[in-house]
Amino acid sequence: MSSQFIPTGLGTEKISKLLRQYAVPAIIAMTASSLYNMVDSIFIGQGVGALAISGLAVTFPFMNIAAAFGTLVGIGAGTLISVKLGQKDYISAQKVLGNVFMLNIAIGILFTIASLIFLDPILYFFGASENTIRYAHEYMEIILYGNVITHLYFGLNNVLRSSGHPRKAMMLTITTVILNTILDPIFIFAFGWGIKGAAIATVLAQFVSLVWQVRIFMNKNELLHFRKRIFNPDSRLVKDMLAIGLSPFLMNVASCFIVILVNNAMKKHSGDLAIGAFGIVNRLVFICVMIVMGLNQGMQPVAGYNYGARKMSRVLEALKITAFFATIVTTAAFLAGELIPGPMTRIFTSDEELVALSVYGLRLTVMFFPLIGAQIVIANFFQSIGMAGKAIFLSLIRQVLVLIPCLIVLPELFGLTGVWISSPVADIVACVVSTIMIIHQIKKLKTGQI
């Protein structure tokens, strides 16, 4: 195992330079990923219609659940690899690669089978109506057939990034976006496949990138590569991996229930178009969140490696710089959402009623965005240094303990406005709790307590 492939610079290089090295590719990749999600919405909205956007929005809970299982394995594996590399435990890091590969296949197959059997009842439960069920079913059926591909693609990309190849991970994501953008109009318009064509384009683009990933990990010159015996289940590593990945898993599961509550509240208080408006706002906000998550992905190997190496001053510096830039990003999103919501929503649709609903919702959704950048970073910081319990708590405090009750109570009091303001209320509470927890943790790290 050649030392040139061991990312020792994580423990010695200047933190700001490391964050640029790891975060910039991750930001580009995550932004591209969010644009890749937007591409489907834009082509579906312009090429199929306003109700098709609502049908697509109904699939969001499904996508969140699928993503939840992907992050349970992928993010947990990425963080664990960073820590193991920091500890110079290269054998365990190698085994994590094999285990994440097999787990993604197993979970992907089981999720696909269970979901296809009950697809329509699930979609109705998620907020579909007689007007939107056809669109939701056609899109989700194809996505589910390609679910194993999606799980493997995202899981291996996390491993690739954490093993010292952030640029390759970025290029893979960009390749997927470009392919999806090229294939969408061909399948939707030229072939006349409608919303089903958008789903086929998504799966096919991911498959091409997955083939590329497999070729990278088959290279024996890589520090982490496929070899005999690494695919054998290691209960200790699997347990650690799932414990670390449990926080983003629960966050995504909670997001699923949140979208279900939102969709049903929207349908009750305004109708199918309001669900489409939520879908548009969700896509726009997703861009900002993905940029912050890119910053977090850049922080994760830096913080994880240095925490494993017990270099606490470097860990804290990584946190401080990441939180600063995340706040800049969310503040910019706040200004864009308040000042130019109309032009942004018209990218998706020319239906004026849908535009008006989207503009109203976007302005309310981003009202406290300047505060949430640091909060997202703090939750991911605990995850990056392996403190799964604290990361889980911060995820649950916003998504479950505050937001879900708000979505149950506020719509009954304020109608459609109550649905939109639930998220900002939860943001404020999460910011307060996160600030208290990170101040306490920083004190412990400064005194060398683990």
Image (spheres, helix red, strand yellow):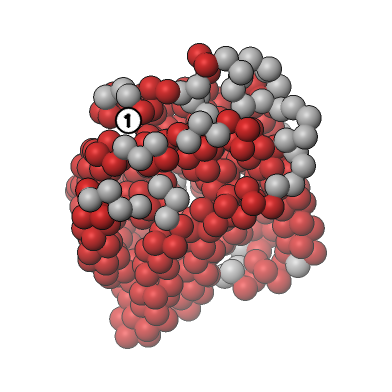
Q: Is residue 404 above or below residue 214?
A: below
Circle 1 packing at 10 Å, graded few (<14), some (14-19), many (20+), is: many
Report how many numbered discs are placed on residues in the image.
Answer: 1
Visible in this render: residue 51? no
Quarter occupied by residue 429:
bottom left
From the viewer's perspective, is 316 left or right of 134? Answer: left
Q: Residue at 63% of width from left, 33% of height from top?
A: 91
| Residue 101 in picture, x, y percent from top left | 70, 40
From the viewer's perspective, is 379 left or right of 77? Answer: left
| Residue 56 in picture, x, y percent from top left | 57, 55
Q: Looking at this view, name the residue that lies furthest to the front.
A: 448
Q: Is residue 141 above or below residue 257?
A: above
From the viewer's perspective, is 449 left or right of 139? Answer: left
- Pick whichever, 412 or 160, lies toward us: 160
- Pick whichever, 79 or 31, lies toward us: 79
| Residue 42 in picture, x, y percent from top left | 49, 42
Q: Residue at 36% of width from left, 74% of height from top?
A: 402
Quarter occupied by residue 12:
top left
Q: Is residue 290 above or below residue 429?
A: above
Q: Residue at 62% of width from left, 27% of height from top?
A: 224
Visible in this render: residue 312? yes
- Quadrant of the snapshot with the N terminus: top right
From the viewer's perspective, is 94 left or right of 170? Answer: right
Q: Residue at 59% of width from left, 69% of height from top?
A: 126
| Residue 198 in picture, x, y percent from top left | 63, 41
- Pick whichever, 370 or 106, lies toward us: 106
Which amino acid type corresponds to the residue marked 1 in the rendered image? Leu
Question: Circle 1 is placed at which residue position?
Answer: 19
Q: Secondary structure at mark 1?
A: helix
